Every structure is written in structure tokens, then in C-alpha cells.
Image (cartoon, helix red, strand yellow):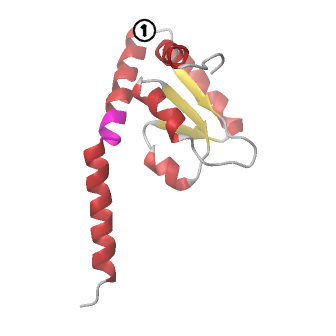
Amino acid sequence: MRKAFDDSSFAEKITSAHILVNAHKTGKRALEFFRLAPVLSSGMRVVSDRSNLQDEKMLEGLVTFRSKKDMSTVIDSFMEEVRNERLVRRIGDVISTQTQIHFHQETLLNDLLWSLTSANNSTSLP
């Protein structure tokens, strides 16, 4: 995003756009969760360069992952949605709601506790 150097400029950008393209620096595959969280919460579509498998699984259904050479096809199809304002609002509402559900603190804590409990149970002796 160009010229989004303060909170109000950033907020204006993410509420006025439909698509964010996230491309990694050469050789980097880590996903920038802190940058994407407000974007997804706003309901913006995100098309991202491939990331590590764990990040892709965590954001499955929220972020569309493609290789850099295949990103343009997805971006073109999402750009077609811009012609239908109601569709853009509906998609934005779904993405925003799913992001809130997916990253709800209580859910994350429960998942963490479950995984810790499962790990402890699998390593305990009978």
C-alpha cells in the first residue's frame, strides 16, 4: 500500500480497497500476520505469494496463496468482483466475520490448550 504511513492513512486504504497483493522479498516465505490482520478484519481479499505450509494452513480460506507467476489470474478474477458493489460488500462481510471467528482469542486459547493436552497425553507412559 502506498502512502499509508500513519494509522488514519492505513485505515482509509484498507476500507477503500478490495484486494491486497502480498508478495514476499526474494527468498523469504514467512507471512506477515501483523500486517494482514487488520486487512483481513476489514474484509479485504488477500492474494499472497506462497508461504510456508504452516502459515498457509492457518490462513486457509482467508488468504488465496499462489506462486508469483499464477497470482495475476486470481487477481483478475477478484477485480471482476469490483464491478458489483453488493458482491464486494458481501464478500467483505464474510472475510471479516471468518477472520474474527478464526482468530477469536478464546478459540485460539482452547486450541492451544487442546494441543498441549494432546501432546502431554501422547508422551505419557501407561
The image shows residue 93 at horizontal and vertical percentages of 34, 22
- Closer to the camera in the image, 31 or 84: 31
Check the image and name the residue furthest to the right: 26
Identify the image quadrant of the C terminus.
bottom left
The image shows residue 87 at horizontal and vertical percentages of 40, 15
Check the image and name the residue furthest to the front: 6
Which residue type carries mark 1? Glu
Number of callouts in the render? 1
Image height of 28 relative to 92, above or below:
below
- Closer to the camera in the image, 5 or 99: 5
Residues in magenta?
Answer: 98-104
Element carrying mark 1: helix
The image shows residue 85 at horizontal and vertical percentages of 42, 8
> Who's the residue at 53% across and 19% down the image?
10
| Label 1: few (<14), some (14–19) or many (≥20) C-alpha neighbours in 10 Å | few
- Classified by dominant secondary structure, the portion drawn in magenta counts as helix
Q: Quadrant of residue 50?
A: top right
- Residue 62 lies in magenta, yes or no? no
Image height of 109 relative to 75, above or below:
below
The image shows residue 1 at horizontal and vertical percentages of 62, 21
- Closer to the camera in the image, 49 or 78: 49
> Who's the residue at 64% across and 33% down the image?
71
> Who's the residue at 44% across and 36% down the image?
62
Q: Quadrant of residue 95?
A: top left
Q: Which residue is mark 1?
A: 85
- Closer to the camera in the image, 1 or 57: 1
Image height of 9 relative to 45, above or below:
above
> Who's the residue at 52% across and 15% down the image?
17
